[in-house]
Amino acid sequence: MHLLTLFFREHAFSYKTFEDHLCDILSDGQGKVPLSKFMTGLRNTGLSKDDPRLLESMTKFRQAVEATSEELEGKEVFLDRATFKDCIKDNIVLIRRAFTADFVIPEFSKFCSVIDDIYWMCRTNTNGRVASYIPQLSRYSADIWGVALCTIDGQRHRIGDTKMPFSVQSCTKPINYALALNELGHDVVHEYVGYEPSGSSFNNIKLGHKRKPHNPMNNAGALVVSSLIKSGLKLSDRFDHVHNQYTKLTGGEYVGFNNAIFLSEREISDHKFALGYYLKDNKCFPDGLNLHEIMDFYFQLCSIELTLEAGSVIAATLANGGYCPITGEQVLDATSVRNTLAVMHSCGMYQYSGEFAFRVGLPAKSGASGVVLLVVPNVCGIATWSPPLDSCSNSVRGVQFCEELVQLFNFHHYDNLKHTLQKYDPRIRSADFQGSQVVKLLFGAYNGDISALRRMALTDQDMSIADYDGRTALHLAAAEGQLDCVKFLLEKCQVPPNPRDRWGHTPLDDAVQFQRQDVRQYLDGHLAQHPSVAYSAIPTDFPSDSFSEIVYKDITDD
Ligand code: GLN
C-alpha cells in the first residue's frame, strides 16, 4: 500500500461520512444503491445477514424492500440514498468494520476458497467406520461431511452438511469443564481431576496421580466434572442451566436434545456404571452424590444436539476468550477458557492427542458422532462433522481437515509467524503487508536511517520498490541529502540508479532541485561508471483507491 492510501485510510472520512462513501461506491450512477450489491459485499466480508449484530439494519432493509413497489421476485431492489443510509446507521460500526476489511481475516473470500479446497480434498477419503455402540449413531450416513467456521469477529463460512443436527457426545466434555471452571474456579475443580493425558482409552476404569481421574477429557474426568456443575440444584435445573449456557456460547443458534440417544446411552451403560462405582469407591466425587443422577446427567449432556454452525460459534467463543463473537456477550472468563484450551490441546483427541498436538498444534475435541471442534486461538473456531471414525475414535475426515489446514496456514501453535514463509497468514492483507514495507523503506531513506535500511535489505526486501507516485528510497535519500543512504542503496543493494517518478524525475534530478551538492556529485560519478537508462518506477499493480478496492473486490468476488 502506498503513502497516499494510508493517508486516505486515516483521513478519507473526515470530510465525507462513511455512509456517503459506501453509497458512492455502491450506487448505480443515478444515485441509487442496488441492495444485492450491498448484501453480496457484506457476505463476502464474512458477515451473515442473520448476524444478531445486524438485526436493526436487516429489519429496516426488509421494511424498505416491502415498501418498494417493484415486483420482488428475482428483481433488483434499488434504494435511494437517504433510505440506504437510514438502514445502515444503527449497525454502522460493524458495517464499517466489514467494508474496510477491519476483521481478523481481512481477505475472507480468499481464505474460504482455501477452506473449500481442503473440504473437497477430504471428501474423497472414505476410510473409517461409523460408531456402532448405539443404534442412533450407527444410522448416521458415512457420506455426511460438513465444515463450519466462525472467526472471533463473527465472520462465517460453511460448506457441506452444516444444517443437520448431531449429538455432541464427547465434545460436551470441554464445554462442561469450562463451565465448571467458570463457576467454581480452577482450584476447586482440580481438587477432583488432574491434568495429565492418560495414554489409554477414554472410557478406561483407571485413575491417575493422587487417585484422581487423569484429566477432564476422558470419561472418568467428565463424570467427576459433571458432578460439580451446579451441584446444589435439582437435575432438571442443572440441565436447564447447561442448556442455557450452550445457547449463550452459540450466540442463540440451534441447541437441541436427542432423547433417543439419551435413552440408548443409558441402556448400554454397564461399563460406565462400573466406572462410576469405581470413582465413588475411590472418593472421587463430592460428598452426598447420587450416582444414578450423575450418570443420567452425563448421558444427557452427551445427547445435546448442535448444528455445525452452532458448533463453530462455540469453538469461536473459545477462540475469543469466552466472548461470543456474534453477540459480544461474555459467557466464560478468559482464564477458564485458557485452561480449557490447554487441556484440549494435550488430551482432546483420545489416544491420538499427542500426535495431534505434534502435527496440528491446536486445541481440539472430538466426539463419537464424528464431530471435531477445533480452536485457532485469537482467530477462529471450526467445527467439522463426518461420522466415520479411525481406530482412536476420531473422525477420519475431521483429523485430515485439521492436518491439511495447518499445512497451508501458519496456525500451528509453534509455527513461527515471521519465518514460516511457505505458509499463508490469513490475518494479514497482502496489500497491507506490501504497503507497510514500502512505507518503512521510504521513511528509512527519508530519515537517513541506515540501520533500518540494512535490516530490510537483510530480510530480502526489494530495496528498489516504489510507492504509488513512483518514488523510491533512492529518490527520497537523494532529495533529503542522505548521502550514506544513497551510497548504501547503490553500492550494497545495487538498486537501479535511474528510476523515474510520476513527474519524470530521477534521484539525480531531486538532488539538483534540492541542492544536495554532495549527493549530486556522487550520483554523477556513479552514473558515469554505471551508465543506466531511466525507467518509470510507477508500480502497475496498485489500486487507485484502497477503499473502493476493498469494497469492490469483495463485491465482485462472488
Ligand atoms: N456418550 C459417549 C460415552 O461416554 C461419548 C463417547 C464419545 O464421544 N467418545 O461413551
Image (cartoon, rainbow, N blue to C red):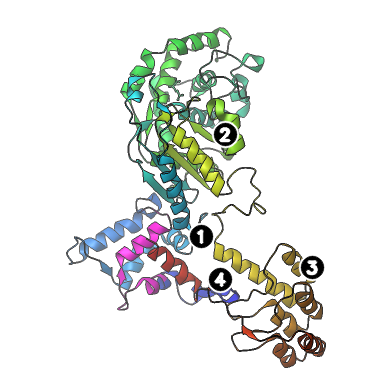
For the residues bearing labels 1 and 2, Cβ distance under 8 angstroms: no
> Can residue 412 be seen in this snapshot?
yes
Badge 3, how many Cα within 10 Å: few under 14, some, many 20+?
few
* Nearest to viewer (mark 4 / mark 3): 3
What is the three-letter code of the residue carrying label 1?
Answer: Asp
Compared to residue 324, the image places residue 470 above or below, namely below
In percent of width and height, residue 158 lies at 39, 46
In percent of width and height, residue 428 lies at 56, 58
Q: Secondary structure at mark 3?
A: helix
- The tag on residue 451 is 3
The picture quadrant where one finds residue 67 is: bottom left
Which residue is denoted by mark 2 in the rendering?
Answer: 356
Badge 1, how many Cα within 10 Å: few under 14, some, many 20+?
some
Q: Quadrant of the C terminus?
A: bottom left
* Nearest to viewer (mark 4 / mark 1): 1
Report, in whole angstroms, how far the alpha carbon at label 3 lies from the one at label 1.
32 Å
What is the three-letter code of the residue carrying label 4?
Answer: Glu
Q: Is residue 416 left or right of residue 218?
A: right
Report, in whole angstroms, how far the alpha carbon at label 3 lies from the one at label 2.
42 Å
Report, in whole angstroms, how far the alpha carbon at label 1 lies from the one at label 2.
32 Å
Residue 24 falls inside the magenta stretch: yes
Compared to residue 544, the image places residue 327 above or below, namely above
Badge 4, how many Cα within 10 Å: few under 14, some, many 20+?
few
What is the three-letter code of the residue carrying label 3?
Answer: Ser
- The tag on residue 10 is 4
What is the three-letter code of the residue carrying label 2?
Answer: Phe
Residue bounds of the magenta highlight: 22-48
Q: Quadrant of the N terminus?
A: bottom right
- Is the CB of mark 2 within 8 Å of ligand 1? no
For the residues bearing labels 3 and 2, Cβ distance under 8 angstroms: no
Quadrant where ligand 1 appears: top left
Q: Secondary structure at mark 2?
A: helix
